Image (cartoon, rainbow, N blue to C red):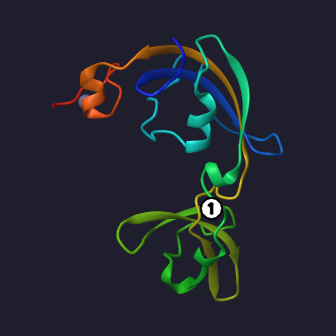
Amino acid sequence: MKIAANTIVSFHYALTDQTGEVIDSSSERHPLTYLHGHSQIIPGLERQLESLEPGAKATLVVPAAEAYGLHNPEVVFEVERSRFPATLDVSPGAHVMAQGTDEPRVFTVVELREKTVLLDANHPLAGKDLHFAVEVADVRAATSEELAHGHVHDGVEHGH
Ligand code: ZN
């Protein structure tokens, strides 16, 4: 069966950035499983997986705009150092949790300045073109219950 809307897809992947550095990968034994056509994975990857069949191997390049978005310079801002607990790691590259306008979110420390910390609220992968080496493990039709719930039920226990 080919990957199409309303199929349940399992695939292995290794994700690298444009420099070849590995960012993430599925584990040897557990591929990533998702319901295709329901925006459960990044849009550029979902679109490029379309029509692949089990056993297919491919290298898919997803431009930043179709992955985690372009880097938005308007959400890079300075915060007074005194507002951070002294024990908190605020070295460049560290991720800190802070209250956003509605929910806690993760910020990346860009730079330490004399009295302030420069924070970036972009997703850490924003602005990056992503390279996925994928191998499709399984494709099957979603059950009517999975479609009604909008998610995969393999090994998932929940009360509804
Ligand atoms: Zn469910």
Question: Where 129 sits versus 142, above or below?
Answer: below
Question: Where 39 sits versus 75, above or below?
Answer: above
Other residues around mark 1 within 10 Å, as few (<14) / some (14–19) / many (≥20): some
Q: Residue at x 62, y 61 (%)?
A: 94
Q: Is residue 115 left or right of residue 6?
A: right
Counting every numbered tag in the picture gives 1
Q: Can you give x and y, in whole percent of width and height, for residue 31 in the image?
A: 53, 22
Q: Can you give x and y, in whole percent of width and height, for residue 64 in the image?
A: 68, 52
Identify the residue position indicated by label 1 in the image. 94
Q: Can you give x and y, in whole percent of width and height, for residue 98 in the image?
A: 45, 70
Residue extending furthest right? 19
On-image quarter of the C terminus: top left
Residue extending furthest left? 160
Q: Residue at x 53, y 75 (%)?
A: 86
Question: Where 34 sits versus 100, above or below?
Answer: above
Label 1 residue SS = loop
Given residues 103 and 46, the one toward you in this image is 46
Q: Decide if ligand 1 comes within 8 Å of the CB at mark 1.
A: no
Q: Is residue 133 left or right of residue 67?
A: right
Q: Residue at x 52, y 70 (%)?
A: 87
Question: Where 75 sits versus 143, above or below?
Answer: below
Quadrant housing residue 126: bottom right
Q: Quadrant of ligand 1?
A: top left
Amino acid type at image mark 1: Ala
Q: Is residue 2 left or right of residue 141?
A: right
Q: Can you give x and y, in whole percent of width and height, for residue 5 in the image?
A: 45, 28
Given residues 11 and 98, the one toward you in this image is 11
